[in-house]
């Protein structure tokens, strides 16, 4: 099953210069909204943006955990979101890239699979 998921992921990988519908810019914006909420300064729009980050990151995680990266069983959504947001903040030069690639890269860096 994991091989099928990996194959589907590879086939869905953007092969052209287009970044897709969701980019690193979106991840950065959504992560900043999450930070404002945590700091007690969140607006209604921030809550929607943070929900977008939650859904996107957990969706990629649930689809590819154990295939592209190997998060510990104790990992929680907030931790995954923080890992992705920190990665995106450290790499603003990549904000025009597809969010799917950036999420996988961030989680793979934080939670590599043991060979």
Image (cartoon, rainbow, N blue to C red):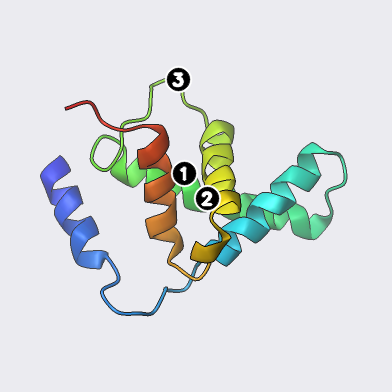
Question: Marks 1/2: CA distance?
Answer: 5 Å
Mark drawn on residue 100: none
Question: Marks 3/1: CA distance?
Answer: 14 Å
Q: For mark 2, does the 10 Å Cα neighbourhood hold few (<14), some (14 to 19), or many (20 or more) residues?
A: some
Comes first in the chain, label 3 or label 2: 2
Mark 1 lies on a secondary structure that is helix
Q: For mark 3, does the 10 Å Cα neighbourhood hold few (<14), some (14 to 19), or many (20 or more) residues?
A: few
Mark 2 lies on a secondary structure that is helix
**Along the line of sight, the residue nearer the viewer: 93 or 33:** 93
The quadrant in which residue 12 appears is bottom left
As drawn, is 77 to the left or to the right of 66? right
User: Comparing marks 3 and 2, which lies closer to the viewer?
Assistant: 3
The image shows a total of numbered marks equal to 3
Question: Marks 3/2: CA distance?
Answer: 19 Å
Asked whether the viewer can see residue 94, the reply is yes
As drawn, is 9 to the left or to the right of 91? left
**Along the line of sight, the residue nearer the viewer: 4 or 105:** 105
Q: Which residue is label 1 attached to?
A: 58
The quadrant in which residue 98 appears is bottom left
x and y percent of residue 22 in the render?
A: 50, 68
Q: Which residue is label 2 attached to?
A: 55
Identify the residue at horizontal 86%, vertical 39% (top origin). 40
As drawn, is 60 to the left or to the right of 47? left
Comes first in the chain, label 3 or label 1: 1
Q: Which residue is label 3 attached to?
A: 74
x and y percent of residue 70 in the render?
A: 31, 31
The quadrant in which residue 74 appears is top left
In the image, residue 101 above or below residue 36: below
Asked whether the viewer can see residue 1, the reply is no
Identify the residue at horizontal 19%, vertical 49% (top origin). 5
Quadrant (top left/top right/bottom left/bottom right) for the C terminus:
top left
């Amino acid at each position: 099953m994991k091989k099928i998921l990996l194959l589907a992921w590879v086939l869905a990988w953007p092969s052209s210069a287009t970044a897709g519908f969701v980019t690193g810019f979106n991840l950065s914006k959504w992560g900043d909204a999450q930070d404002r909420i945590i700091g007690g300064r969140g607006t209604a729009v921030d809550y929607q943006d943070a929900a977008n980050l939650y859904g996107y990151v957990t969706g990629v995680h649930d689809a590819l955990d154990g295939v592209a990266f190997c998060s510990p069983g104790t990992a929680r959504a907030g931790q995954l979101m923080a890992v992705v947001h920190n990665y995106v903040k450290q790499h603003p030069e990549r904000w025009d890239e597809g969010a799917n690639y950036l999420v996988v890269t961030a989680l793979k860096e934080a939670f590599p699979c043991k060979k």
